[in-house]
Every structure is written in C-alpha cells, then in structure tokens.
Amino acid sequence: MTYCCGILVRDGLVMVADTRTNAGLDNVATFRKLHVFEKKGERIMAISSAGNLSLTQSVLSTLNEGFETEDGDRETLLNAPTMFQAAQRIGRAIRHLHEIEGRVLEASDVSFDLSFLFGGQIKGGPMRLFMIYSAGNFIECTVDTPYLQIGEHKYGKPVLDRAITHDINLYDALKISLVSVDSTMRSNLSVGMPLDILIVHRDGYEAELKYRIEPGEPYFHDLRERWSAALRAAHNNIPRPPYATKT
Amino acid sequence: MTYCCGILVRDGLVMVADTRTNAGLDNVATFRKLHVFEKKGERIMAISSAGNLSLTQSVLSTLNEGFETEDGDRETLLNAPTMFQAAQRIGRAIRHLHEIEGRVLEASDVSFDLSFLFGGQIKGGPMRLFMIYSAGNFIECTVDTPYLQIGEHKYGKPVLDRAITHDINLYDALKISLVSVDSTMRSNLSVGMPLDILIVHRDGYEAELKYRIEPGEPYFHDLRERWSAALRAAHNNIPRPPYATKT
C-alpha cells in the first residue's frame, strides 16, 4: 500500500509520499514514489504514485521515453505545453499500458490498479494539482477542496478535512500533511518511512524544498510526540458525557 | 454504510452505533443498529450490525425466534448458557441465512455482506465482546486491543488507537468513541445521526446507560466544537518544519 497527499494552496504546492511497498506482508521494500521533473525557472512537475509498482514504474518509464509524434519528436512531461496536456499524457501512458498489460494481468488475477497525483506549474500557466485514475481520467484540485490523496487515504483524511484551507501557510500545510501521514502509519503497516516531501512556491518554477525524512529524524519525531500529547490533552479537556437513561 | 464501535475496559462495556442506512446515495433512511437483550440482574447482551440491512435484520429475527432443539426447546440469545455459545448462535444464524439466501443474492450481484459486534455478560461468566464476520466466525476483544469496530472503521480508528486503554474510565471511553464517530461522520456521508449508545458496568447485568443522541443535542454539539478547537490549537502549537533542501 501507499499514502501520498498533495495540497495546493494560495502560496503553492506541497506533496508528501511514503516509500513502503509490499507484496503480501512478508515482502516489504522501500521505493521512491515521489518523482520530480524540473527545468529550473521554466517548469516544475511532480508525480506521486500508488498501486501496483510494476505498473506505476512502467507509466513513468513511458513518460520519460515519450510518445513519438508524426514528425519524429517525442512528447514527454518536460515538453508538454500546459499542465493539463501533461496530465493527459499521463492518462495516455496509463491507457497505453492497459492495452499492453491489462488482459494478461487480469488472466493472472492481478488487477490493473494504479493512481497518481500530479502537480506543478509551467511558466505562463497556473499551478495545478491533478489526481489521475487507473482508467487514465483525472480530476483537479480546487479552492474548495485544496488537497488530494491516493493510496490508504482514510486514516489521514479527518485531520486534512479540518485543517487545510486554501489560505494556509505552505509550511503549515506541510506540517498538517505530516500529521496526516503519521496517523496513517500508526494504523496501517503498509505505509512507512522514510517520507519524501516537496514544496514549490507558486510562480517559483523550482523546488523550494525537496527532502527525505528518515526514520528517527528529530523534527518528525517531535511532531509525532507533540501531536499525541495534544490529542491526550484534548480528550482530557472535554467533559464526560452527562447522559442518563430515560426511564 | 455504518459505523459501530465497541469498547471493553476494566469497568465495563461501551457500545456506540450510528443509524444511517443507504441504498445508493438517494435512498437514505434511519434504522436502529444497536439492539439490547436484557434480563435485569441476570444477563445483558447487545448486538450492533453493519452490512446489508435485509441480512442483518433477518439474522436478528432468526435469533429472536431461536433454533428448535431436538426436545422442542428454542435456542435464543436470552437462554444461551454463555457469551461464547451466544456468539456461536449468532454465527449459526448467519450461516443458516447464507444457505437460504447466499446463492440467490449472488445471482443478483448482491454480496453476502454483514458483520456484528456482540458484547455483554451472563451472570457467573465474564463480560465479553466479539466481532462476528459474514462467514459466521468471530474474534474477541482482549486487554491489548480493547475495542472493535465494524462498518466504515478507518476514519475513526486513529483516535481510538491513541486513547483507548483497558484502564480508561467508562465515560471517558464513551467520550472518545463519540469523537471517533464524529471523525467518521465528517468524512463519510453514509454514517449519520442519531447515535445509539449503551454503557454496561461489569457485573451489573443491566444497562447503566441506554441513550439516543439526536441531531443538535447540546453535549455532542459541544464535544464536536471542543474537539475541532483542540485540533486547531494542537496544529498551531507544533512548530513549522525546519527542513531545507540539501544542495
């Protein structure tokens, strides 16, 4: 399993991804799921992936090789004219893979299961964040709901629901997304450290922060402790229910 | 969908259930999912249910009618010798229903989907809490993990994971379970008010508290507000991430 979260707010984009992959419970490994495509000053894009690793890696390889056009050029993410067309290229790569692999995998009872978050900005265009489904279609993040999640999304959703707004500071958004990942990791063994994080300022066209949080990293450890303590205090400060049976 | 939670701690048992049922998104109704079977001073048992309503209601009707024995008696929950044997009777009722309904429902693409929480105490025996699956098998709550959930369990699990211990006060356990239900209702429309709650003291053999929390009820409203405010404060009190890109 996987947990990835993307947040698009007024000041920019936050993306967080875990790195755990598993085939069953006894075959666990670490793979990067957050990939950054960058031409500094011109464009920055990031993809995070969930689902079958062989499929998500193949989609990325397809995107890196590009689709050949009639006049011999290759269509990649780095030369897509807009973020929308870049998202369409990801969808196309997924559909292409489904044509090749879908039936064979189904025959082996492997479902064609994958999804992506895709965010970034190309100079001259707006910053955007998409969630791309296994059918190659996609939705886009808006001001009303400024975050998207893929993978094991439920455990970490309540904290995002309550705290993330379009106006939140970028580093506060990162902080909340780390709390969201923490809640997920506590409840689901298939989501695990290290974590990859990315912050991009709107109209910055480069990564402001690209970082891997390793196990035992002091800030993240402190965040987990503080969050746990705050939740305990929050429980304690709510009075006990006054209910009595009506007889 | 549904969310029900049962907590078994040193002092007794807490059970909470929502009441929303839905067939699709446009057919929403209110049905009681928490049912209490009580002979005051002798035994108290409670069942909460999740899954297909026609199936869970049929299981309850079967249990109320009882299974006829060879000498013409009827085996019900109210005459089960032990909680374990009562749980087995629920399993038997599920399997009986599966024999009658399973194949016909599958032919209509309706999956045989149901689960129960079953808790209580019979005089002379220990207080127990079980989770019973659609195959009729079941697991039991222990001191290490003193709660069980059925239905839409993920959103409300992190708060239980962090706060519920075997030693917690019964009314604190109720309070935390209400926070857990609140988190679930915020994230999943198919879980909704009113809520039914039950508290049973160990060796009490009767309901200490049987109550329905209606929409707008002041304590629950206050709990939601306080919890939201506490979470906001908790975020604010955690410092922002100090990370910087390593170049």
Image: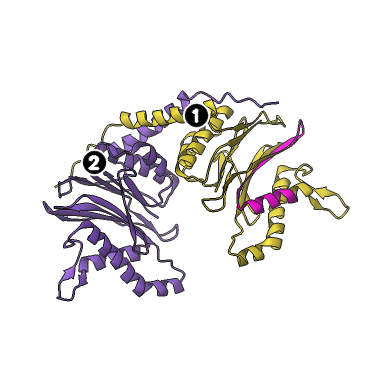
Chain colours: A yellow, B purple
Is there any visible trace of residue B133 in the rendered image? yes
**A140 or A48, which is in the foreground?**
A48
Label 2 Cα neighbours within 10 Å, binned few <14 / some 14-19 / many ≥20: some
Determine which quarter of the picture holds residue B187: top left
Judging from the image, mark 2 belongs to the subunit labelled: B
The subunit letter for the residue under badge 1 reads: A
Give the distance between the C-alpha atoms of the residues marked 1 and 2, in whole angstroms.
Answer: 32 Å
Q: As rendered, which of B72 and B236 lies closer to the eye?
A: B72
Q: Position of residue A58 (x, y in %)?
A: 70, 52
Residue B10 marker: 2
In this rendering, is residue A223 above or below B30? Answer: above
Residue B214 in percent (x, y) is at 28, 46
Magenta residues, as a range?
A: A38-62
Residue beneath label 1, please?
A221
Secondary element type, mark 1: helix
Q: Identify which residue is drawn at 33% across, 46% down.
A: B147
Residue under the point 36% across and 31% down: A232
Q: Amino acid at mark 1?
A: His
Question: Residue A64: x and y, percent?
Answer: 76, 46
On screen, residue B186 versus residue A211, left or right, reads left
Report whether residue A132 is seen.
Answer: no
Q: Secondary structure at mark 2?
A: loop
